[in-house]
Amino acid sequence: MALTNPIPLIGASRPDSDLASAPARPAPHDRPGQPASARQWAGLIALALAVFTICTDATVLDLAIPAISEALRPTGTQLLWIIDVYSFIVAGLLLTMGTLGDRIGRRRLLLIGSAGFAVASGIGAFATSAEMLIAARALLGIAGATLMPSTLGLIRTLFDDARQRSFAIGVWAAAAGAGTAVGPLLGGWLLERFWWGSVFIVNIPVMVVLIVAVPLLVHEARDTSPGRFDLVSAIVSIAAVVGVVYAIKEFAAHGFRLDALVAGTAGLALGWWFVRRQRRPDPMLDLSLFAIPRFSAGVASNGLSAFAFAGVLFVGSQYLQTVLGFGPLAAGLMMLPGVGISVLGSLIAAPVADRVGPGRTIAGSLVMSAAGAALLAFCGTDTSPLVFMSGYALLGVGAGVVTALASDLVVGAAPAARASNASSISETGYELGISLGVAVLGSVVLAIYRSGLELDALDPAGARVASDTIGGAMAAAHELGGVEGALIAVSAAEAFVSGMHVAAVATAIVMMVTAAVVLRLLRERPRNTA
């Protein structure tokens, strides 16, 4: 049955107009369009399923870290790449794929990506080495990059009524948040029953459903005048992201290295060149969109909220299992409250923002996320898991609200013909936030963890394994046994928690600064005062 009175969400999309002079909220002439049919709402469910699966895959491996470490013996840097390369590749390719979707058709690109996602999942499930698993995750990232802008771009054209479209974007955001949060729970359930490769196998039937359902429920949409495809900008944008993230990881893992310095410098230089190149006519990235305060605020808040959520998820899953000693399923269940609260945050964002204004709502949610991150600084080696659960729940509700409102602000600022490009910019910020959250916060924890280890009782080979990951340290301590093994385990747990405390405080500061910036960009009064 079609929804006839969906909850309105602020920032409804506008018709094509002069973007540089766009108002801070929808223009008065925006009126409801044709109500959506039952088929269109069914199409939304299919698109939400796609984004749910993509976001699940970004975090489903977090609880599999110990099992992967035992099976494939990755180094600390390889382990970071296994987790992070997916979001990292997605972030590098989203702009390119968003532009490609505008040209060849968003539905067509979605179907191509679904098939590629299924194939890459099969490769990952049966990987026999860390290098093979990293390659499989990279292929999943390429496929995921085709899916993300396609889903949001299709929603932009699937719903003619602005209020229904805004509600649909809220559902989309809830699916994204739920997928990110459900990943660890699903991973824990699968790991309790099957081998670690099962976290990939589960993607395949979902992709098959999408390949069958989407052509039946969603009509094709594309830009009728897409202009030229800038292959040079596409390559430069990917290389810029690669260089910067590689430098961050290598500096944290090995200290100063010339190759990391060169890669980071090259990445920054390429990023500067990319921005300069976008000032040409018909750019891949429409920089004029950033002149709109609500667009800029949406991109920034979305990316930095994802930064905090993904970083805490990566560190927290290891904390629950290796420091507090819970199994994968138990750790996943402890994250379950954050799942429901994140989804609830996405769905209640509309009425809250409609009453108090999007700026105040987003800023308040970022402050809530900051409080959640700060709470993790009180987690210790023997504290109750309720401390972590409370912090994670606060992060979850903050991220849910921000994702829903920021996505609607971004999509609402762009003309329909550029829907995929605008959504790809938003998703680039989101996925880059996830990638940098794992890379930066994970690297901070790794660096402090290594500096606090006491490994005198281990031989050089054992010390190298223990210094790579806390899972390796716990395995080495177990093999050594006795008092010396117990001392190593305590040292590893305390060193890891020290790193987590620093990362938590840094995250809280970033969230507070972002909240202040959003309030400045979105100065507006609430639309309803009753």
Image (spheres, grey):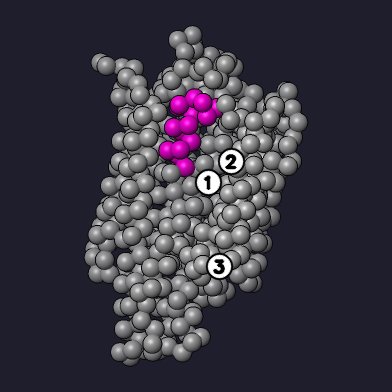
Reading the image, the residue beneath label 3 is 257
- In the image, residue 417 sits, relative to residue 242, either above or below, namely above
Residue 431's label in the rendered image is 1
Please state which of the two labelled residues, at mark 2 or mark 1, is closer to the viewer.
1
Residue 321 visible within the image: no
Q: How far apart, in angstroms, are the residues tagged by discs 2 and 3?
A: 35 Å
Give the magenta part as a residue range.
289-303
Residue type (three-letter) at the residue carrying disc 2: Met
Mark 1–mark 3 contact, CB under 8 Å?
no
Considering only order in the chain, which callout, 1 or 2, is on the residue closer to the N terminus? 2
Considering only order in the chain, which callout, 3 or 1, is on the residue closer to the N terminus? 3
Q: Is residue 220 left or right of residue 429?
A: right
Q: Is residue 27 magenta?
A: no
Residue 148's label in the rendered image is 2
Q: How far across and down, in percent of the image, does residue 61 sit?
A: 50, 60
* Residue displayed at 31% across by 72% down: 494
* Residue displayed at 64% across by 42% down: 273
Q: How far across and down, in percent of the image, does residue 319 sit?
A: 36, 65
